[in-house]
Amino acid sequence: MPENSKLIFNKELLAITIDRLCYQLIENHDNFKDTVLVGLQPRGIYLSQIVIERLRQIQPDSQIRYGELDVSFFRDDFRRRDLIVPSSTRMDFIVEGKNVILVDDVLFTGRTIRAGMDALLAFGRPERVELLVLINRKFSRQLPIEPDYIGKSIDTISTEKVKVELKRPEGEIGVWLISDEKFYE
């Protein structure tokens, strides 16, 4: 990582945080009979895959339904971007009457989550929608969206970026706060 970055989560702290999030989900949703997990494309799927794998290790007898949702064409800024390369939606179930847990890596402005909720309606009307994020960037919200499950909340300014690396064949796994300025020691 660049020298103007600050480590937020190393691999070990990330594992502990994901365990905590999983146990919070179990506490609130028990055997997941009426609950589904949905990872938001593109980067939320990496976190959601780790969470679903860990939940299945903790509760091997539960039948947790999992899907991945592409929100590309539901974003309010998709026409402002250059070429849109859509991801794929993989959901072999409807969410009618289910509790849905949307999973994304970083909550910043709230626009991706809003797009995710719009895209979700194509699969039915959920009973309830909750949000799990690894990083909650406070003070950056443009829409009134708040997560139900938070790995870590951090104060950031608009020039800072959060870099989440969860699946890399080589290199370090972790989360970093990267600034344009050199003020981290």
Image (spheres, rainbow, N blue to C red):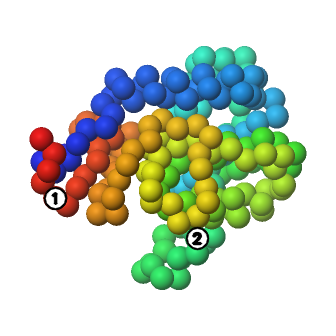
- Residue occupying image coordinates x 36% and y 26%: 13
- Residue occupying image coordinates x 58% and y 64%: 143
What label does residue 108 carry, if any? none
x and y percent of residue 49 in the render? 54, 37
Give the residue type that dot 2 points to. Answer: Arg
x and y percent of residue 8 in the render? 31, 37
71 and 127: which one is in front? Answer: 127
Query: Considering only vertical position in the picture, is 110 above or below 16?
Result: below
What label does residue 181 carry, if any? 1
State which quadrant residue 120 falls in.
bottom right
The reply, left or right, for residue 101 in relation to residue 177 is: right
x and y percent of residue 68 in the render? 62, 49
Whole-angstrom CA distance, mark 2 to mark 1, is: 30 Å
Give the residue type that dot 1 points to. Answer: Glu
19 and 149: which one is in front? Answer: 149
What label does residue 75 carry, if any? 2
x and y percent of residue 182 in the render? 12, 54
- Residue 70 in view of the camera: no
Query: Considering only vertical position in the picture, is 142 above or below 20?
Result: below
60 and 25: which one is in front? Answer: 25
